[in-house]
Amino acid sequence: MALARKVLHRQARLEIMQMDDYDQAVAVVFVQGRNINLELLAEGWAWAAEHGKKKPEEPEYIAAEELARSRKIGLWIQDNPHPPWEFRHMDKAEHLKAW
């Protein structure tokens, strides 16, 4: 929902950084010159990177995530939010428990 509010019905520019293990593009999203990835991190709605993946912007992204965590905003309101790379491997019953 946070992403949709920022990009829905707006022209976006994508900078593809790499292809992931699922053959999907990993990209930085820009709308009107704003780095949407960084905004989502700063607001607590995203993880900086899947464990073990490195990107050129990582220090700035890691700092934004850490600040959101310390402020307990977005996902970080929860005691133990499930990162997408763990959620992806859960079965349907586990998905329901996670919510």
Image (cartoon, helix red, strand yellow):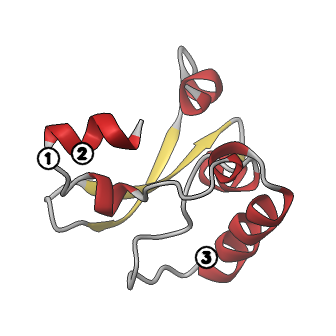
Residue 25 drawn above or below residue 10: below
Disc 1 is placed on an element classified as loop
Q: Residue at x 85, y 58 (%)?
A: 71
Identify residue for label 3.
57
Q: Position of residue 51 (x, y in %)?
A: 40, 78
User: How many discs appear?
Assistant: 3
Q: Residue at x 61, y 76 (%)?
A: 57
Cα separation, mark 1 vs mark 2, equals 5 Å
Mark number displayed over residue 91? 1
Depth check: 44 or 10 in front? 44
Q: Position of residue 8 (x, y in %)?
A: 54, 19
Q: Position of residue 44 (x, y in %)?
A: 69, 50
Q: Residue at x 63, y 22 (%)?
A: 5
Pointers 1 and 2 in contact (CB under 8 A)? Answer: yes
Identify residue for label 2.
94
Residue 33 drawn above or below residue 55: above
Mark closer to the chain start, 3 or 1: 3
27 horizontally vs 10: left or right: left
Q: Position of residue 30 (x, y in %)?
A: 60, 44
Depth check: 90 or 49 in front? 90
> Can residue 92 be seen by looking at this rendering?
yes
